[in-house]
Amino acid sequence: MKLEEKPIEDIQARKDYRNISIDRVGVCDLKIPLKIKGCEIDSEKDQNIQASLSLSVNLGPDQKGIHMSRLLETALDFNGSFSLGNMASFLIALCDRQNSADSDVKIEFDYFFNRHAPVSGKISPQPYKCTYHGEMHPEGIRLTQSVVVPVKTLCPCSKEISDYGAHNQRSKVFITITHEGKKENDPIGICLEEIIEIAERGASSPLYPLLKREDERHVTMSAYNKPCFVEDVVRNIASELHGNPSFDSYELRVLNYESIHSHNAFASIGKRFSGK
């Protein structure tokens, strides 16, 4: 049976008479494959990832709806090779396709970095939870890059008061770096790998997926020689970020999964300008 062909009305383009604008409308939890690059110090290295996207634009008071399919079409235009450096182009494309003034893109993904065991040199991949976020407004474009870095901390007080040993635990460092006033294809001055290295230097020890006995001995003793309160870790990291000319501001949070308490400990530093 052949269906009768007839014009299809664009319902979304109808006028809306309630005169109420919408700040954000779009899609979330959109899973797509991405080839992403620019995360490592070697900026040409890339990795195929599964990303979870949130895409949205503003909607004026006189239009019934946005064209949702165009959000996905725009995302697929960029999935061949994506980096934080072309996020501005992504935001502009969303606005152009929807005739909007504002757009917002959040991309969440796991990125694997190879970790080298400190003594044996054994290499193993470790995933890091990462987020790229872009916002476009008439005033300009803001980009942020966030990463969660697992580390190890050893308590200075426990070491000082104990005849032997000290309590230690896994910790997480949450770092967000903000870049203001970006334009299409502007370079990004700091990559995720560099941010991870700063976080690891601020703690008692990095974490490694694969350790042989000689590596485990090294990690245990190295952490013992560099005890850190949660306050020390957040200050150590902030001291490296402050004054860095590669970005405009940063936010920090450190969470210790306390090994001798049923609660956890944290320290945070709110948005601070880098002072560049």
Image (cartoon, rainbow, N blue to C red):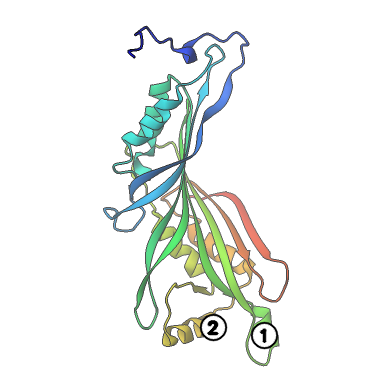
Residue that appears at 29% across and 42% down: 80
Label 2: element kind: loop
Quadrant showing the N terminus: top left
Residue that appears at 35% across and 8% down: 4
Say if 46 sits above or below 80 in the image. Answer: below
**Local crowd size for mark 2, using a 10 Å CA cut-off: few (<14), some (14–19), many (≥20):** some
The image quadrant of residue 268 is bottom right
Report whether residue 79 is seen.
yes
Asked if residue 30 lies left or right of residue 49, the reply is right
Where does the image place residue 14, in percent across and percent down from the top left? 50, 9
Say if 118 sits above or below 3 in the image. Answer: below
Looking at numbered disc 1 in the image, what kind of residue is underneath it? Glu
Report whether residue 183 is seen.
no
- Give yes or no for contact between labels 2 and 1 (Cβ–Cβ under 8 Å): no
Looking at numbered disc 2 in the image, what kind of residue is underneath it? Asn
Determine which residue is flagged by label 1: 160
**271 or 128, nearer to the observer:** 128
Residue that appears at 55% across and 72% down: 152
Where does the image place residue 269, in percent across and percent down from the top left? 61, 55
**219 or 226, nearer to the observer:** 219
Determine which residue is flagged by label 2: 225
The image quadrant of residue 158 is bottom right
Furthest toward the bottom, the residue is 163
Instruction: Indicate which disc, 2 or 1, sits on the residue closer to the N terminus.
Output: 1
Where does the image place residue 121, in percent across and percent down from the top left? 34, 79
Residue that appears at 30% across and 44% down: 81
